[in-house]
Structure formats: C-alpha cells, structure tokens
Image (spheres, rainbow, N blue to C red):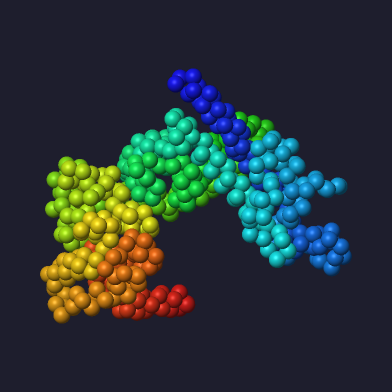
Amino acid sequence: METQADPQQRARQLALAVRSQMVLTGEDEEVLWWLLHRHAAPAAAAAAAAADEQGDGGAGSSGGEPGAEPCLNYDDFTQARLPAIPVAAECREAMGPSADVYFQASTFLRLARDAGGCVPAAAIFRYCAARSAQIQLRLELGVLDGACSGALSPHQLRGWLARRAPLTACSEALVAEGDWCEAVAGRLLLLHARRGRLLIRDLVGSPEVHELVMALHALEAADAAAAAAAAAAAAAPAGVDGGPGGGGQQGGAAGAASAAALAAAAIQQQQGWFSPGAAAALRLRFAELDVDADGLLSQRDFSQGTMTQLAIQRLFAHHCRGGAMDWPAFCTFCAAWEQRHHPAAIRYFFPLLDLRGGGCLGQGDLYTFFREVHALWVALGQYAELRVEDVLAEVNDLLQAPDPDRITAADLQRCGAAGTIIGLLLDVNLFWEYENREALLQQQQQQQQQQQAQVQTP
C-alpha cells in the first residue's frame, strides 16, 4: 500500500511544481502590462495595419482617435513577423516559459473583439491576471488535498480561508477573522458541498470563488506595492542641499501610486459579498437574535422575525443539529435565503416544503404553508378577506408544473420564480411585498423621479 502511495505522491508533487511555474509573480504582471501597452496601438490604427497586411491598401487611418483604448490584433499577439517582434515572443523572453500558457491563439479568440478584430490591451492583461490567480488557487487547494481525491473537506476549506483572512483587515470592520471565515465558508459550502465534500474543480470554476480570489489578489498586490514603495523611499539618497533628491521624488510618486492601488483594492473588497463588513452585519444579526448569548439560536429566538412557525420548525428539523442553530448553520441559512433562486438554495429549502417526504410537493403541502402565512398575516392586522385559494392559484401559474400534484425541485428551478415562491410560502413579509408589488413599484418610480428632479435642479 505504501509503495503504491509513494509514486502517486511524487506524481502529484511533480504536477504541482509544473503548475507553479505558470503563476505570474507581481514583477511578471508589471512586465506584462508594460509590454502589452508597448505593442498596442489605438483601435483604428491596429485595424488599419491588419487591413494593409491583408492587401487592402492604405485606406485605414494611421492614427487612432484621441483617447482611444490601445488594442492588439491577432498577428501582434501570436505570430513572429519581421521586422516586428510580437508581444508573445517578447513576453516569453522577459517572463520565461510561463508566458506560453497565456499567449495562445485560443486566448485571443476567447476575448471580445471589436469590428477590426482587435482586443484591448487591458482586457488581455485582466484575462492573464485572472488565469494566473486561477492556477494559483488550484495549486493552493491541491496542496491541501493530501489524499489526491480531487476534493476538500469543510475543515480544509476553512483552513484555506483562515490563511487568507489577514489580507482582509477584518479588524477595521470590527469582526473576528474566524467569523469572516465562517461567513464566507457558509456560502461556499451551500453552493458547492456535495455529501460533505467540495470538488476542487467546482471551487476553481466558481464565479463566487473567482470574485473572492481576485479581490484577495488585488489586496496582496497592493500590499506588496506599498512595501516596495516604502523600501524605495527609505533607500533613496537625499539631495545635496538636504532636500529631497530625484530618488525621493520617485519614491513619493511610487508611494502615491501604491496607496491608490491599495485604496482601489480595499474598495473592491468592501463591495463584495465576502467583505468583512458583510460578515460583521451577519454577526450582529446573530447576536441580536441570540437573546441568552449562549452562541445558539433556539426556535423561540428565531421566531423574532417574520417566518412562520411551521417554516421555523421545518428549518430546525432539517438543518440544525440538536434542535439549535449555531453560527455556521446560521451563515449557511442566510446565504441560502439571500439566493433563493439558486439551484443550491432550492435544494436547501425543498426538504422543508416536502411535508410528506416523498420528493415532490402536492397542493396540500402548498395549502398548509399558505395557511400558516395567512394566519400570521391576519395576526399582524392585515385584511382577513384574503383567500388562500386565490394565492395558491397564482403560485401554480408561476410554477407551470406538468403535474400540479407532483411538483419536483426541478419544476421549481425550471419556472424561474423559485425565489418568489419560496418566500411566499415561508415568510409573511415577503408575502406582503408580493401582494403590494404594484404599489411598491409605483412608489419606487416616484422616488427615482424625485431624485432625478433634484439632480437637475441647479
């Protein structure tokens, strides 16, 4: 057994070593940015050059419009033609063999091109940076997968997040790094966990993970730039007259640029679902519900909201161990509730709705949940004339299920209104919003008109 494991581990280490050579360093990215813009030309000029080479003559303009975005055509990107050296060859000379991964014909064809067949240099750079971050992510997750199973456990995922947490500056948002890790892990586990495991290929291809990794990559690059600028400023010689010399001026400019990069990276992180601010708000909500401050939510604690008692009972029965909801379970629930339309959220909520446990919903299940919502609706002082049967008919119109007496999770996902239907069945506040949707829409339009009028008023 041991002899079989050793070759497997060696092959794994070799594969990781090969992939590690494909990752762009911060210096590589600087070189790439400079070379792309060195070879790029305004879109009109690049298109004219391509037309000239195809024998169309010199009809195109030799210069682009002022302010036009610099672009590269296909030949400049891939082919070696004299007397010009293509950007791919120069990047390979400066960056080594890792450039071959990024400068392929398939890369250029994958990117959006203009009418002249040119791609902006900035778009090429963003793609290469994202591809490098994806390779780096696969490496980091692959190192954690010691069993070579191609999957991670929830504990391993939390460990990876814990190593990345210092970049997020959680202390500025007054949230612990552990709470941030759990808030992020809750969403990723909801979206990608299958039978207690997370496939690495699913994580690498996940838009949510990509957004997180790119923000962390930007923060890491900005921190490195700030450190380099500080080191350059400290090493810069002073002027003869005791004032700052030319090196000091360059250090100041580099410091300003690194500060701007750090600020931009921080803003990008603050706007994401993974921000420390979002985790802090989630933790505050948990603390507000946890009346006895024991770190667990009971059904009574959870009933402070607008979910029906039946919905809460079903939620705790299916997704809470020991009859209480802890912080990780709360994070997963909030992630599912925010994305009720997502297939993973449908899988999360469907067992709650399936009262008979048969894998499908009948009209009796829908009626039972609506009856609970209606009772809470009346208790809150709303009009009692609302007929459950009328609302049930509207839901069936939204579902368009082939068999209304056997509504499956696939039917719920296929209809495109899963988020609305789940909200109507479980939460009286969302039911109220649905009943008053026309009035709310009109009110929203009036507010937008008032805001536009205020902007136009001198």
Residue at the spot x=20%, y=58% of the render?
356
Extreme residue toward the top, this view = 3
Q: Is residue 321 left or right of residue 90?
A: left
Residue 125: x %, y % from top left:
63, 49
Q: Give the total of numbered labels.
A: 0
Pick the front one: 411 or 112: 411
Q: Is residue 76 above or below residue 410?
A: above
Pick the front one: 325 or 176: 325
Q: Is residue 180 left or right of residue 305?
A: right
- Observer able to see residue 45: no
Residue 421: x %, y % from top left:
30, 67
- Observer able to see residue 128: yes
Q: Is residue 2 above or below residue 182?
A: above
Pick the front one: 98 or 200: 200
Residue at the spot x=16%, y=75% of the render?
382
Q: Quadrant of residue 351?
A: bottom left
Residue at the spot x=17%, y=55% of the render?
313
Residue 331: x %, y % from top left:
30, 48
Residue at the spot x=85%, y=65% of the render?
56
Q: Is residue 264 left or right of residue 50?
A: left
Q: Quadrant of the N terminus?
A: top left
Q: Quadrant of residue 68?
A: bottom right
Residue 451: x %, y % from top left:
41, 74
Q: Is residue 62 above or below residue 8?
A: below
